Image: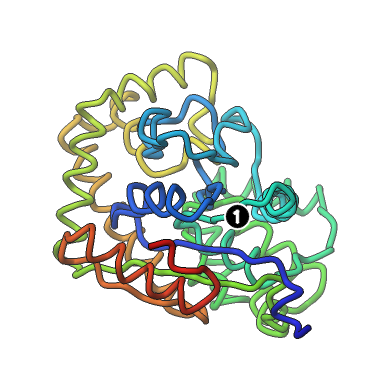
Amino acid sequence: MNEAETKPRLLVLLGPTAVGKTNLSIEMAARYGCEIISGDSMQVYRGMDIGTAKATMEERGGVPHHMIDIHDPDYPFSAAEFQERARALIADIHGRGKLPFIVGGTGLYIESLCYDYRFSEIGMDEAYRAELNAFADAHGEAELHERLVRVDPESARRIHPNDRRRTIRALEVYEATGSPLSEQVAGQKKQSPYELCIVGLTMERKILYKRIEARIDLMIGQGLVDEVRGLLERGYAPGLFSMQGLGYKEIVGYIQGDYGLPEAIELLKRNTRRFAKRQLSWFRRMQDIHWIDVTEANFSANLHTIRDILAGKFIPDPE
């Protein structure tokens, strides 16, 4: 028996926001006996439904979904916790004779799971972390991020300037080791503990951006402003990691009177377009992805293409 035959199988569907992962993944899961594990860093939070574009229970069509609504918004969820939980879920799903299926757009989470990324074992330096938080409070996230640019430009390129938590962690690793986090990551062997089949969805940029804008208009119509206001009223502070997510930070600014609703919507659309671009850049650097251009909205044709990929990889053609 070769090594591939001893590894558990893992199906992955990734792509930028609004490319169409949700509907396609549910149809794929129903056809191939999958249980879906969300690879999204924000869908773990309860009460954050509209802004994270969670599929409703009706939309899920009876397909089991995991890693959704597992924490309150004040919980500091991390890629390391995602990796640990997802590994346990994969083993459990296999044990029940089903195929685990990762679906999402958070590049670090998906890559760390697929290729057994070993997170730095450097412990937290509470004093240094407090110093960095105080610096960010006084000078802003952009200035904090600039400190990372000076010592670890590669990590800075992959971490959004508003992501204070990951910026601080990268600075913390550099302070403790004298070595950039990016060099430590690059030095790891990207070997997977799974027999992988990774499908990536891409789309003509202009069409994707139109889909993003339409989705945001839909979110506003579904009550995104009320969702964010409700979170604030329940005591979830604007500075929380969860509240810095797309759709939440922009609407918080509107609710706090920093700008009007039209400006908030345009800001959200702009930030989401930029986010989609960063997602694609991350995924393009990953290996083993079978890319499908879904610019032409032919659901049946796209499913047929995916069926051929899976049949050639490790799933018998069900038809």
Residue that extends furthest to the front in the rendered view of this protein: 319
Question: Which residue does the image show at 52% across and 38% down from the upper left?
Answer: 242
Question: Which residue does the image show at 27% across and 44% down from the upper left?
Answer: 268
SS at mark 1? strand
Q: Nearer the viewer, residue 238 or 120?
A: 120
Give above or below for 164 relative to 317.
above
Say which residue label 1 marks: 100
Question: Which residue does the image show at 48% across and 31% down from the upper left?
Answer: 238
Q: Nearer the viewer, residue 54 or 134?
A: 54
Residue 17 visible? The answer is yes
Image coordinates for residue 24, horizontal then vertical, percent? 34, 53
Residue 248 visible? The answer is no
Q: Choose top left, top right, bottom left or bottom right for residue 302.
A: bottom left
Q: Nearer the viewer, residue 252 or 146?
A: 252
Question: Which residue does the image show at 83% across and 63% down from the upper left?
Answer: 122
Q: Nearer the viewer, residue 73 or 109?
A: 109
The quadrant in which the C terminus is found is: bottom left
- The 10 Å Cα crowd at callout 1, few under 14, some 14 to 19, many 20 or more, is many
Give above or below for 17 relative to 244.
below
Image coordinates for residue 294, horizontal then vertical, percent? 24, 66
Give above or below for 232 relative to 247.
above
The quadrant in which the N terminus is found is: bottom right
Residue that extends furthest to the top in the rendered view of this protein: 233
Q: Choose top left, top right, bottom left or bottom right for residue 147.
A: bottom right
As drawn, is 235 to the left or to the right of 298? Answer: right
Q: Amino acid at mark 1?
A: Pro
Image coordinates for residue 287, horizontal then vertical, percent? 52, 81
Image coordinates for residue 307, horizontal then vertical, percent? 38, 68
